[in-house]
Image (tube, grey):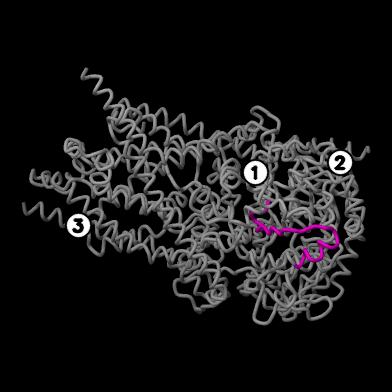
């Protein structure tokens, strides 16, 4: 008797919960799920006169161009390694900055610093590429003209030296995104019950210990979620960072070629939506598999923090 | 005790110095292009980018001023779209995240996955375009800038869900429930007030993505009256890049003089960022107030 | 405005319905064009739309004419007023109402594909770049049976000979834009410096002759580079036209390299040729001597900007006619002189890099062609599209010259597409900017028809069978070519690497495929 009442109540609660979900569900179905059916384009040879629905099926042919090239290894390596560095360094810097900002609290200086740190995020990649160019241009750049030249050093052809760009790209990425990412962690740190910190302090913890034993553990769930989401996109790269910032300089391809730039460079000319679609599907599937695996690992270790 | 106060002070000082350095690193490069936008065109190419150019000039801004009515209208579109989009998005996301954070919701894992999945797969632009332009007739309407793509981001939903489940004590929800509050009351009276920090954060993210968006405008807007400020900028920049790529070689015969020069491009960049820089302190105030409320009540 | 867009869609639907209904869809007879897609669009448009605007259509056929523009996209009001002025002509002449769809240059290819993939009405568009891609994707209508009946004026204007370049397997797919197509690599240089240093510019017949001149410039003006490369691409590559290179319908700006040279009908690799090697070695030599602007391979500044800033003495540009030097002078702020570095050499790409095509989904190709015909033959129509309304958007200063109204320029007039002058219809029917030399048009016309022509003129290459190789080769070329062409990488070590990379990426397959198609074409 009681169990059926409980069941009924549980069902009613589930229905109420569904009402919360309803508006979002409608949107996701229209905006994401129905258009997702469009992946079939990846398996078609698009013929505009026939329309996308009636074009011929060609199996996996659209995928060939991704693998049948000596660039396949380079672009896969670059995409994965950069993303790994971005995930690790990005998280470390963002948390570091968030802790420092919270330390300064509500002071005017904290607000000014935070504004300054988020400023780069407000710029589009096109603009950032101009900024980078202003520093690195061989003939007019600040580094060559105002730093190396007065110091009596010979100029560096920055856009022709792949080696430097491994660091330049990482720096630019951190420069743009650290302030922005730190906001996520700041909200979490600010949300930490101040009584917990107080208790730690009374127990004699110093600042570093407080961070180590109170703040970081509380940030763990957020870090896990952010990382899992990043892993889902690990086969994607920020097109602006890898294409526009290096000014599409050919000499830099060994360190700037990623899946997205390769697809863009190849398809700009061919304008083939079938092949573009195939590349997107490939990136999604790899990300999907990786994220399922890592979620599984998280679930094993710490079920509360798993993404789903 | 004394040592501890010292260590706190030292850490405080450390935080200040490090942030100061970071802030300078962030601002200086931007300053360089702001100065470039005020630099005489020829001086810019002749002596390179300098923090103290030999000759200042407002020529780039004069050039843009001639098109000020267009700029003002584009600002209007951007502000309207950003405001509407952010509000709608917050409503959808906070509602959606609530059941996902409740442990007694039977399908929470399924729906968490349902929303996360949208982050991984997409059908590309063609199906989305058909959906919004042919079924909803949004082409060349202001809705095309608000509705497609940005209204709900899986990232934001999961962020809010996490905040709900980690920062709002279950006991509080249970207590409200025992008092006989409905789920909607709990959501409105308990959840929302407690999650101001994360809502402010998500509002900032969403607002920024609306403000910086040019993709919707690119696909759905042909009428210049509905250009947002980003669309205006990106079209100028894209045309220059397109020309640089050599793709048009052979097509052009004459009329080249109308292209904006380097300092004009820098000026355009500056103009696109100024409103956000001006609006940011207000948002930030809200952010910090939000964080305070969160801390005190939590 | 929302109502307006509903109306547009409604009208499109009516057109589709009527085309499907009357059954005499010429697409049926055209072979490869199935009429089936009318059914698809029929079901996606709801009945309400069709009902509300049914009476608007009927008398006149609506044609959506999209075109490439680098100018500011005009506001709706400005555009509609121009449309109305055009319609006054077209209603009477051909029973057509036109809707103009200006597309920003950088977005045009993408937007045309998107509109077509989703089934929107778009009847006419221009193919800037690779016509073959459009043919391979079946985006363009087979107008073989219609073009002579409905657009003979346009054919006469561009000449029957040029129409060959838009053919594939005996079918005609587009009409080339009627403009100066005989591009020649010109050297533009600062006259004041040439006079100051008493440089003998007349002695220059080709790019090699520039070395002694650049040496003097470098000595006298260490603050500037003798030659600027820049935004706009790899202009040096076009001086190779001296060797009568036919790109065999690959892109003009960055040729894929599988080419014909001279009278030979054997496809070879341009980048493996001695001629190419000689040129890049020359450029490397110049680069090391400091003659070439160091940033050339990457800069975003145009050559003209660099010259204007006093940083360079000369640059190479590709132009037809002789208007280029005026323009160079006004952009550089110095009086510029010019010399030809190579003579024009016409191949298929020279002509079909800008063509006008009817969309393969067009329901009324006859009407579309009739309208296209007007853009080649009716000066009023083409001037309206390019320059807008007289006295509002421009003022005539003579029968053939225009200027912008007092106090306005290309960025502030309500409507202009002045950049598109070489794209829309016939350039020879259009007004020109004030100051254009009187013989410019005649010279362009003469060279269009008297320049040397490749033996493979008219051959178009279908790249579909080697799509994968194209992607890979494009990437290799992007990686090496700019550095080689502007001398910033050493050909002694990098050229062999470049050739190896090309081989690995499938250059040989591309050459083989081209040879095969070329042989088949020659046999016909």
Per the image, is C93 magenta?
yes
Residue B12, disc:
3
Q: For residue C47, which numbered disc appears in the image?
A: 1
**Residue C62 left/right relative to B258:** right
Q: Please give the name of the residue rendered at 81% of the width and 36% of the height, measured from the top-left corner.
A: C32
Is residue C270 in view?
A: no
Over which residues does the magenta segment extend?
C85-109
Q: Mark 2 or mark 3: which is in front? A: 3
Q: In this view, does A216 lie to the left or right of B254?
A: left
Q: Distance between the residues labelled 3 and 1?
A: 69 Å
Q: In this view, does B296 lie above or below A6?
A: below
Spot occupied by residue A286 in the image (x, y as percentages of width and height): 50, 32
Q: Mark 1 lies on which chain?
A: C
Callout 2–callout 1 Cβ contact below 8 Å: no
Q: Measuring 77% from the left and 70% from the top, which residue is drawn there?
A: C324
Residue furthest to the top in view is A1
């Amino acid at each position: 008797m009681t169990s059926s009442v409980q069941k009924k109540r549980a069902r009613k609660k589930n229905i109420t919960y569904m009402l919360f979900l309803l508006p979002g569900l409608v949107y996701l179905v229209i905006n994401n799920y129905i258009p997702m059916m469009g992946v079939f384009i990846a398996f078609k040879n698009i013929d505009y006169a026939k329309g996308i629905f009636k074009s011929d099926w060609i199996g996996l042919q659209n995928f060939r161009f991704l693998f049948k090239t000596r660039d396949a290894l380079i672009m896969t390596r670059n995409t994965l390694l950069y993303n790994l560095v971005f995930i690790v360094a990005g998280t470390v810097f963002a948390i570091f900055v968030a802790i420092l900002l919270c330390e300064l609290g509500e002071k005017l200086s904290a607000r000014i610093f935070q504004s300054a740190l988020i400023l780069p995020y407000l710029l589009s990649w096109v603009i950032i590429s101009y900024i980078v160019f202003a520093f690195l241009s061989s003939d007019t750049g600040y580094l060559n003209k105002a730093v190396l030249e007065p110091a009596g050093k010979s100029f560096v052809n920055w856009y022709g030296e792949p080696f430097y760009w491994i660091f330049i790209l990482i720096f630019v990425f951190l420069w743009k995104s650290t302030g922005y990412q730190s906001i996520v962690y700041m909200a979490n740190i600010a949300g930490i019950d101040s009584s917990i910190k107080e208790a730690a302090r009374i127990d004699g913890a110093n600042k570093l210990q407080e961070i180590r034993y109170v703040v970081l553990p509380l940030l763990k769930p957020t870090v896990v979620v952010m990382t899992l989401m990043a892993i889902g996109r690990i086969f994607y790269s920020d097109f602006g960072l890898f294409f526009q910032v290096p000014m599409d300089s050919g000499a830099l391809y060994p360190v700037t070629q990623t899946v997205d730039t390769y697809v863009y460079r190849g398809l700009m000319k061919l304008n083939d939506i079938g092949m573009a679609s195939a590349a997107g599907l490939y990136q999604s599937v790899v990300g999907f598999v990786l994220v399922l695996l890592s979620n599984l690992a998280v679930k094993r270790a710490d079920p509360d923090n798993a993404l789903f | 005790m004394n040592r501890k106060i010292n260590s706190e002070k030292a850490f405080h000082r450390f935080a200040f110095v490090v942030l100061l350095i970071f802030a300078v690193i962030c601002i200086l490069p931007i300053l360089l292009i702001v100065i470039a936008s005020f630099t005489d065109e020829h001086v810019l190419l002749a002596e390179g980018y300098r923090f103290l150019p030999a000759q200042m000039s407002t020529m780039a801004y004069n050039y843009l001023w001639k098109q000020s009515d267009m700029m003002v209208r584009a600002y209007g579109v951007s502000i309207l779209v950003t405001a509407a989009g952010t509000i709608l998005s917050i409503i959808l996301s906070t509602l959606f995240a609530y059941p996902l954070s409740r442990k007694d919701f039977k399908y929470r894992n399924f729906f968490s996955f349902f929303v996360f999945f949208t982050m991984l797969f997409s059908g590309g632009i063609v199906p989305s375009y058909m959906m919004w332009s042919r079924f909803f007739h949004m082409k060349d309407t202001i809705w095309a800038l608000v509705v497609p793509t940005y209204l709900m981001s899986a990232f934001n939903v999961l962020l809010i869900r996490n905040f709900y489940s980690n920062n709002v004590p279950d006991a509080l929800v249970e207590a409200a429930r025992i008092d006989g509050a409905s789920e909607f009351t709990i959501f409105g009276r308990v959840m929302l007030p407690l999650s101001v920090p994360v809502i402010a954060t998500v509002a900032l993210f969403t607002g920024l993505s609306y403000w910086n968006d040019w993709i919707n405008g690119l696909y759905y807007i042909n009428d210049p009256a509905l250009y947002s400020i980003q669309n205006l900028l990106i079209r100028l920049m894209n045309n220059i890049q397109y020309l640089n790529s050599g793709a048009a070689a052979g097509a052009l015969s004459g009329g080249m003089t109308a292209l904006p020069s380097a300092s004009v491009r820098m000026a355009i960049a500056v103009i696109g960022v100024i409103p956000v820089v001006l609006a940011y302190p207000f948002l930030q105030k809200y952010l910090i107030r939000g964080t305070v409320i969160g801390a005190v009540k939590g | 405005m929302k109502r307006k867009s509903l109306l547009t869609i409604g009208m499109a639907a009516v057109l589709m319905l009527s085309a499907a209904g009357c059954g005499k869809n010429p697409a049926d007879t055209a072979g490869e064009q199935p009429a089936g897609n009318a059914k698809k669009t029929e079901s996606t448009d709801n009945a309400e739309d069709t009902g509300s605007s049914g009476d608007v259509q009927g008398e006149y056929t609506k044609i959506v004419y999209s075109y490439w523009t680098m100018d500011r996209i005009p506001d709706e009001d400005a555009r509609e007023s121009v449309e109305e002025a055009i319609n006054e002509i077209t209603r009477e002449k051909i029973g057509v109402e036109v809707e103009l769809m200006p597309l920003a240059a950088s977005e045009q290819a993408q937007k045309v594909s998107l509109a077509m993939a989703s089934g929107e009405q778009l009847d006419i568009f221009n193919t800037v770049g690779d016509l073959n891609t459009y043919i391979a994707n079946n985006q363009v209508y087979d107008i073989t049976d219609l073009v002579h009946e409905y657009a003979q004026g346009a054919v006469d204007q561009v000449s029957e000979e040029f129409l060959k370049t838009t053919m594939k397997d005996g079918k005609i797919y587009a009409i080339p834009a009627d403009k100066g197509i005989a591009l020649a690599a010109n050297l533009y240089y600062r006259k004041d410096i040439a006079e100051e240093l008493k440089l003998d510019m007349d002695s220059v017949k080709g790019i090699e002759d520039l070395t002694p001149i650049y040496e003097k410039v470098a000595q006298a003006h260490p603050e500037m580079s003798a030659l600027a490369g820049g935004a706009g691409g790899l202009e040096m590559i076009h001086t190779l036209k001296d060797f009568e290179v036919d790109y065999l319908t690959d892109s003009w700006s960055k040729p894929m390299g599988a080419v014909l040279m001279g009278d030979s009908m054997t496809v070879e690799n341009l980048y493996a040729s001695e001629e190419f090697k000689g040129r890049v070695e020359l450029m490397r030599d110049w680069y090391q001597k400091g003659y070439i602007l160091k940033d050339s391979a990457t800069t975003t500044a145009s050559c003209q900007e660099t010259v204007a800033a006093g940083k360079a003495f000369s640059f190479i540009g590709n132009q037809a006619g002789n208007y280029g030097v005026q323009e160079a002078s006004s952009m550089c702020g110095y009086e510029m002189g010019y010399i030809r570095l190579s003579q024009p050499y016409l191949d298929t790409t020279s002509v079909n890099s800008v063509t006008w095509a009817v969309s393969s989904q067009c329901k009324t190709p006859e009407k579309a062609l009739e309208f296209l015909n007007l853009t080649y033959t009716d000066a009023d129509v083409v001037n309206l599209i390019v320059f807008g309304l007289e006295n509002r958007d421009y003022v005539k200063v003579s029968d053939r010259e225009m200027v912008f109204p007092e106090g306005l320029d290309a960025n502030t007039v309500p409507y202009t597409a002045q950049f598109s002058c070489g794209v829309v219809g016939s350039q020879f029917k259009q007004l020109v900017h004030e100051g254009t030399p009187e013989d410019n048009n005649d010279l362009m016309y003469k060279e269009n028809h008297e320049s040397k022509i490749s033996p493979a003129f008219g051959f178009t290459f279908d790249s579909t069978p080697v799509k994968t190789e194209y992607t890979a080769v494009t990437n290799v070329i992007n990686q090496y070519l700019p550095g080689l062409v502007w001398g910033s990488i050493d050909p002694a070590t990098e050229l062999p690497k470049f050739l190896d990379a090309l081989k690995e990426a499938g250059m040989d397959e591309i050459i083989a495929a081209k040879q095969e198609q070329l042989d088949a074409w020659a046999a016909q």
